[in-house]
């Protein structure tokens, strides 16, 4: 039970469940190791609100229960910053706000059923960790952003696309291409801007177009 949490290993795994009703993460680091961090009944937030990395690991697994969120808003200071090879995030409906600073992140499963997901990869790509055609991100409104030469997905082949289940999709790249498949049975496009990059967007249902 902590107000602020800092944990460091020299590569060993980290397995922590906070029971205080929410915890602010200072620096949790397991370089090359896995990080498993749960907030039971509360939020996982950035202790310093400073846009510097909070969680570093090979595979990073973040979980909140109850109404808990991961991060608190889609601003640089209020997101939870991670450096991960593979990222998994689960809430029970709370929103997710995560910015990966490692130069690109592979998404295993990010799930906020009923909540929204805002995911940024600074200086890299957002890709499918499993390359398996199974859903990677589930949420109401998805806001996906990559900077630098980053792409969303890697090609138009199912398994190489980023697979989502969403109601509304907003997506921005800095010129990188985007390859997305929606498996929810219908999708509304809010705004998609690839700044000259190519876009491949497929859905298993109807596609309602906003701004592309």
Image (tube, rainbow, N blue to C red):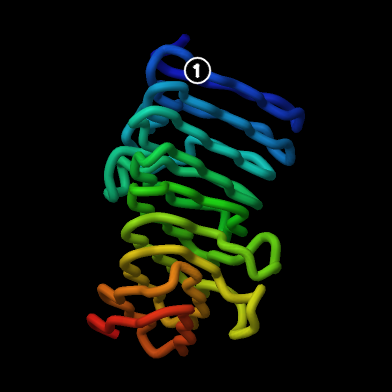
**Residue located at (45% from left, 63% from top):** 165
Where is residue 163 shown, x and y percent of the image?
A: 54, 68
- Residue at the far left in the pictured view: 210
Q: Residue at 51% of width from left, 28% of height from top?
A: 27
Residue closest to the eye, 111 or 28: 111
Where is residue 108? Give x, y as percent: 62, 54
Local SS, label 1: strand
Image quarter of residue 145:
bottom left
Q: Residue at x 52, y 79 (%)?
A: 179
Mark 1 = which residue?
18
In terms of image quadrants, where is residue 171? Answer: bottom left
* Above or below 140: residue 209: below
Q: Is residue 149 visible?
A: no
Residue drawn at x 41%, y 40% is 80
Nearer to the camera, 27 or 2: 2
In the image, residue 43 lies at what x, y percent?
37, 28
In this picture, residue 189 sits left or right of residue 7: left
Coordinates of residue 123 in the picture (x, y in percent): 50, 64
């Amino acid at each position: 039970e902590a107000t602020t949490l800092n944990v460091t290993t020299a590569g060993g795994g980290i397995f922590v469940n906070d029971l205080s009703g929410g915890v602010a993460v200072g620096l949790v680091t397991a370089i090359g190791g896995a990080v498993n961090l749960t907030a039971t009944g509360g939020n996982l937030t950035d202790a310093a609100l400073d846009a510097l990395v909070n969680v570093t690991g090979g595979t990073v697994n973040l979980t909140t229960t109850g109404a808990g969120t991961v991060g608190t808003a889609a601003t640089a200071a209020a997101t939870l910053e991670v450096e991960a090879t593979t990222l998994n995030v689960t809430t029970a409906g709370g929103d997710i706000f995560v910015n990966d600073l490692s130069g690109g992140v592979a998404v295993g499963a990010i799930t906020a059923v009923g909540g929204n997901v805002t995911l940024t990869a600074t200086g890299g790509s957002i890709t499918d960790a499993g390359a398996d055609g199974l859903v990677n991100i589930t949420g109401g409104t998805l806001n996906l952003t990559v900077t630098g030469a980053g792409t969303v997905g890697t090609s138009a082949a199912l398994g190489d696309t980023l697979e989502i289940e969403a109601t509304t999709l907003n997506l921005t790249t800095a010129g990188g291409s985007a390859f997305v498949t929606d498996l929810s049975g219908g999708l509304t496009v809010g705004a998609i801007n690839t700044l000259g990059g190519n876009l491949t967007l497929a859905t298993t249902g109807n596609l309602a177009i906003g701004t592309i």
